[in-house]
Amino acid sequence: MRLVIWEDENGYKHRSSVRDDDPDLYAEMNMGIPCDPPNIGLRLDWEEIKRNLNNVLVDRGIFTLHDVRVIPNSLRSAIETVMYHPLLALFIQDDTEIKQQTKANK
């Protein structure tokens, strides 16, 4: 088996596992095994994330480009504060599900 990275018609990149002798095109035709990161578009609450980011920006006094430039790493830190834990939770959830499926298949 080997991994193939490909891009769908909407510009999203994917990774699929295909047999060594299969052409790369098989990955794009859903004939491989998907090995994507968690689907953040469907599984994150974007309204909550937008609200939380707004609130973190206000709480930290980040209102203008000047504020972003004067307070080192302010914007990056605000985004990380809001996004890190929800994203990490998706990876943990996927890992747990994979382990449970592996146990069930034994």
Image (spheres, rainbow, N blue to C red):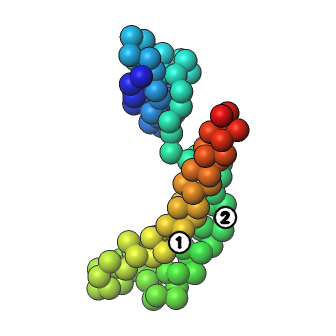
Confirm whether residue 66 shows in the render. no
Residue depicted at x 45% and y 89%: 61
The picture places residue 69, in percent across and down from the top left corner, at 29, 80
Figure quadrant of the N terminus: top left
Residue under circle 1? 82
Q: Is residue 60 visible?
A: yes
Disc 2 secondary structure class? helix
Q: Position of residue 43 (x, y in %)?
A: 65, 52
Image quadrant where residue 6 sits: top left
The amino acid type of the residue labelled 1 equals Val
**Image: 66 above or below 10:** below
As helix, strand or loop, the secondary structure at mark 1 comes to: helix
Give the position of the C terminus as an image quadrant: top right
How many residues crowd around disc 1 within 10 Å: few (fewer than 14), some, or many (20 or more)?
some
Of the image marks 2 and 1, the number of the one nearer the N terminus: 2
Q: Position of residue 105 (x, y in %)?
A: 67, 33
The residue at the point 62 percent across, 39 percent down is: 102
What is the number of the mark on residue 47? 2
Q: Amino acid at mark 2?
A: Glu
Q: Between residue 79 and residue 66, name the one nearer to us.
A: 79
Kindly give the residue lying farthest to the right in the view shown.
Answer: 104
Image location (x, y in percent) of residue 68: 35, 79
| Mark 2 to mark 1 CA distance (whole Å) | 12 Å
Q: Nearer the viewer, residue 13 or 96?
A: 96
